[in-house]
Image (tube, grey):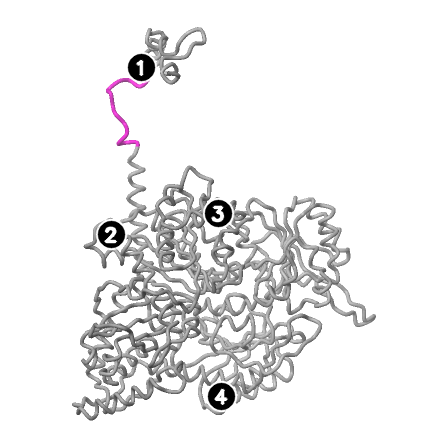
Amino acid sequence: MINRFKNKRILIKSYLSESGLWYLAKSLGDVLSKNNEVFYIPKSKYKRRESSGVFQRYYPEPYDENLLSNIFHIPLSSSRKAEPQILNIVRKYNIDIIISFETFMMKGQWASNIKRKTGVKIIDVPMPEWSNGRYIKNNSYSIFDEVWCLTDTSYKVFEKYRNRKRVSWDYVDREAFTPSGKSKDANELCFYHPGTLNPGFSQKNTLQTLEAFSDFSKASESNAKLLVSGRLNKEESRVATKCKNIILINDVLSRGEIVSLYDRSHCVIIPSTREGLGLSFYEAKAMNCDIITVDADPMNKHTEYLCEVISYNKNETPVPFAVTSKRKILEQINRYYKDFNMSKNNAKEIEIKKKVKSQEKVKEENEALMSAFEGEDSSEDIVLEKLDSDNVDNDVLGQLKAKMQKKKEEEMPEIVSKRSVSIELAIVGVGQAGSRIAEVFHKKGYDAVVINTSAQDLEFIDVPPSQKLLLEGSLGGTGKDLDLGREIFADNTDIISPALERVMDGNHMVYLAISGGGGTGSSSIDTLVPMLFETGTPVGVIYVLPKATEDAQSKKNSIETLSRLARLTADNVVSNLIVVDNARIEQIYANLSQSKFWQTANNAIVEPLHVFNTFTAQPSNFTSLDPSDFGKIISCGDCSTYGVMEVSDYMEETALAEAVIDSLGSNMLASGFDLGQTRSGGVIITGSEEVLEKIPAININYCFHMISEQTNGATVFQGVYSVDSDSDSVKIYSWFAGLGLPRDRIENLKKESLQQSAIASEKEKNRDMVMTLDLGEDRVNTVSEEINRKIRKKKSGFSKLQKGSKGKGSIIDRRRRR
């Protein structure tokens, strides 16, 4: 959305002092300044005069004198009316667009007056929790050309306004909010509560946070610390000073000092009653902090540690206060404390003696397993209880862990013939690679549209012509030029939008399929991802990294685009990022012919997602992985990886566990994922009913134990399905979500790109040498001879004949007319 602004002069109106609104406005200005000139003017506050009781306007000054040093800001005088001052600025600096943050609508006439006098476009970015419901109801926000809604709540509040837009950008100052790289202290748990600088108008729930942590500190006898920044009132200070594990930082902090607090902390406690956006949530996530907050939008988009809302208090604003309690906050602190300790201890071996089982023991375990399968609630997860020393051998577990180093490569199986799915997906394929992936989805019954800037690349994509969209704006394609591609997509939103609306109609989620190496697919994300996100439909991305043999520009494009996608994913604009590595696929299918390679590779990319989507829609006689469970996995956020493995020797005690390990080694995605980062996952075991009845329960126990071991105790949903099959084998499908980026592969791409760029640069330097032919003649004489040669040629009979005479055409012209 915001990338459509180019070569504009933009005026941003916000607080120009330390506040969440200022840092939010500054993040927008940083993005816009890449293609535009950006100016800032201050937003006013009001304070009551002690003598008269009358409210007086003033412009807050920053505490840090360097806060505004790198921007073009224009001060306003509090002794003069704001409107004529803004009008003069618009005219003096030829402003094209004004973006006003949290416009005070009681004084909002300035916007309509300046629009009328100058024709300037004015956009409002409201914080709905501070908006007055009366002005929203009275259609007052219609004076703006656009109302930018940053959250689902805001979008709903302004639902009757045609000028509302769902907008997002990278809210975080990435230069400042970057982890130091040092590991957080695993022996001392550290919480952080960023309080307010304005305790008279705080929504941070600081008092209940302090009380809850104080109770936790007493009951647990933990040495965990709570860092608290901001300004506390008397009651908050009283509670804090009574607890030795609460550390107060009563001062205005610089951004660097705030970054240091995040870098030290494991978890941020922010049980806010309301948030306009919640910038601190995005900053905490950028610093790899977990979050405890309230189960209300937009706070609950960022974490699973959610304090229950016990009531909502309403006032004149359209967003009620989400009220929680000290007890609910304490519950989540205790839950996080337990998970923190489990993550430390999870790697420890469970001491178990090896035992030869009798047939009676196997039968007993089978009956216990089937009893779990046939429970009253078929959707309930199979819970792996703590294993005792009679069931699992410690040496066997060690051997299973060693299996993680083994890379067993097998093709993904085609297993589903009838399409019945849990989640209706729409697919948007962009560029040649993305279109081929969308084509595979289309053949499996999904709604798909393909987009390209090259007509010939669209020609052989096997989807109906009505589902193809050619964007014109170049000779054909983008030549791997990302800037050209971005310009083409930005200029064609009017024809892209109807195509997206058609394909998304009736679907629950949309996936954008693109390749990182080219120009068309990579350049599309700046336009398409925000457009898809603004529809309110969850957005996933299937992103393909280039092959090892591709050129430096392809690898450079892929890294740049992946960086942009990572930011969009971290900001929850992208719900699921599937990173596919063509270099990995190239290794797995090295023996295939060129004609079959891409078809096989694209099927391998699509098949696991399709399999999970279909199995979770089927009933099970044992236990099922429900559609809602799959929904949690697919919308968990960040990256996903999945694998499939067929096991024939399933009666072997460790066979199923080994299969899970091997499937992770041979999956179709980029290598280098850290499964310990998993936040949500799913495992499906399938086989004929006869086969499932024969499997000893301990075999499945080993399987799920290894999953728990590798995911640090993440929530992993489980399903067991009987299928019609004559095969004496079982298949295991595994999906792990919430992962970080595959760092090793990214570093290799960077290295390869730099090496190839260096070679290309050296060739360019040698260009003059290799393209020069020394004729052994004096250069001045040579130039003179060349001029004389051209004169002689011009006077030759052939030249006169070719050019024709007296207005007649040349020989070539006459041949064309015949």
- Precedes in sequence: disc 3 or disc 4: 4
Q: Tag 1, which secondary structure?
A: helix
Q: Tag 2, which secondary structure?
A: helix
- What residue lies at 23% left-to-right and 49% top-to-bottom? 594
Task: Check disc 1 and report the residue beneath it.
Answer: 781
- What residue lies at 50% left-to-right and 75% top-to-bottom? 268
* Kind of residue indicated by mark 2: Lys
The x, y position of residue 678, in whole percent, is 37, 72
Task: Check disc 4 and report the residue beneath it.
Answer: 217
The x, y position of residue 399, in whole percent, is 20, 78
Q: CA distance from mark 4 to mark 2?
A: 63 Å
- Precedes in sequence: disc 2 or disc 1: 2
Is residue 644 toward the left or the right of residue 206 in the image? left
The answer to whether residue 561 is above or below residue 692 is above
> Which region is colored magenta?
768-783
Say if the magenta span includes residue 774: yes
Q: Tag 4, which secondary structure?
A: helix
Task: Check disc 2 and report the residue beneath it.
Answer: 596
Q: Quadrant of residue 367?
A: bottom left
Task: Check disc 3 and report the residue beneath it.
Answer: 489
